[in-house]
Image: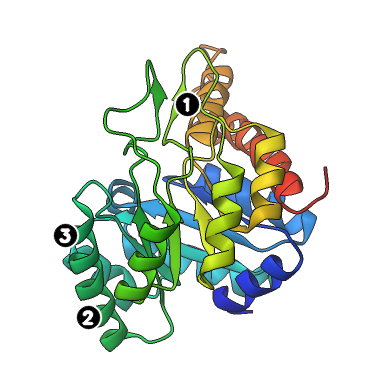
């Protein structure tokens, strides 16, 4: 399937595709294994920083090779890219989708810049999916002491206008979600009624960013209300770090692949559970 077809299929089944970020082979392997065992589509994401570390061409090659080797529906997304130059690089390399993030800007400017990006990128490749974000949920996938400054939930009218004027293929509305996880727990609850009302008013598929720290019940309700893709990053970063620490407990162990295998297992457990939840298997 293409990514567009995969999204349409999961929406029709009241499921959601899991989107997980990577910056190393351990996380990549764990995500592919979990999705393969469950026989569900999955999206691999790289932020601008992660893409710079992994290398855009390498990320594309990894996904293509694994897709051909396993026959799985694996897709690659440029997650929260901010510059046209980097977006063009990802699109020309073969990414399936890109997210242009101008959510921190005033709405008028966000609309104008997103509209320009859509026009320019579609001239390069018609088949690539372009996502935009409306409202503000913070910017970092990390452990937070408090909610990010300036967090703002969007309105149905704002989302409808944003979609209509920009021509984006996917939209990520701020509906109570935030990037990162609060150290003491208790991430905000999602506004499920808002998700449902947005779904009723637009045809464009909805993406939920900042999935780390959201309760299972909120995930289920949000997917039922219309969320088609869910992003998870902070949770797997935390699992990766704990796994590496566990792998390095033996001070005599210096083989990276043996240390990283613990990180792979830790990330696998998180991804597997999330994929089960998003696909109605929990």
Graded by Cα atoms within 10 Å as few (under 14), some (14 to 19) or many (20 or more), the crowding at tag 1 reads many
Q: Are marks 2 and 3 in contact (CB under 8 Å)?
A: no
Q: Are marks 2 and 1 in contact (CB under 8 Å)?
A: no
Name the quadrant containing residue 197.
bottom right
Name the disc covering residue 109, or none: 3
Name the quadrant containing residue 192.
top right
Quarter of the image containing the C terminus? top right
Residue at the image position 44 percent from the left and 62 percent from the top: 171
Name the quadrant containing residue 87.
bottom left
Quarter of the image containing the N terminus? bottom right
| 19 to the left or right of 85 | right
As drawn, 91 above or below 14? below
- Give the residue pinned by disc 1: 181
Q: CA distance from mark 3 to mark 1?
A: 28 Å
Kind of element beneath mark 2: helix
- Give the residue pinned by disc 2: 120
Front in this rendered view, residue 74 or 281: 281
Label whose residue precedes the other's in the sequence (2 or 1):
2
Counting from the top left corner in percent of width and height, residue 133 is at 36, 56
Counting from the top left corner in percent of width and height, residue 91 is at 33, 74
């Amino acid at each position: 399937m293409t990514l567009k077809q995969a999204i349409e299929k999961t929406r029709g089944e009241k499921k959601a595709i899991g989107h997980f970020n990577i910056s190393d082979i351990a996380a990549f392997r764990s995500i592919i294994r979990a999705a393969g065992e469950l026989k569900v589509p999955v999206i691999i994401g790289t932020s601008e920083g992660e893409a710079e570390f992994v290398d855009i061409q390498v990320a594309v090659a990894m996904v293509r090779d694994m897709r051909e080797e396993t026959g799985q529906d694996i897709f690659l997304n440029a997650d929260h890219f901010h510059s046209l130059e980097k977006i063009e690089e990802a699109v020309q390399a073969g990414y399936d989708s890109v997210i242009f993030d101008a959510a921190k800007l005033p709405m008028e400017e966000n609309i104008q810049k997103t509209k320009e990006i859509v026009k320019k990128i579609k001239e390069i490749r018609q088949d690539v999916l372009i996502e935009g974000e409306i409202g503000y949920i913070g910017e970092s996938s990390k452990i937070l002491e408090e909610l990010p400054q300036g967090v703002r939930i969007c309105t149905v009218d704002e989302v409808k206008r944003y979609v209509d004027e920009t021509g984006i293929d996917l939209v990520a509305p701020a509906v109570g979600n935030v990037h990162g996880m609060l150290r003491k727990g208790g991430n905000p609850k999602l506004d499920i009624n808002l998700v449902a009302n947005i779904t009723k008013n637009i045809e464009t598929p909805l993406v939920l960013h900042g999935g780390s720290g959201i309760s299972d019940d909120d995930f289920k309700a949000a997917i039922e209300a219309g969320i088609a893709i869910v992003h998870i990053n902070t949770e797997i970063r935390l699992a990766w770090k704990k796994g590496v620490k566990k792998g390095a407990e033996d001070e005599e162990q210096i083989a990276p692949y043996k240390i990283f295998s613990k990180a792979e297992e830790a990330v696998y457990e998180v991804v597997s559970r999330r994929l089960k939840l998003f696909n109605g298997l929990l």
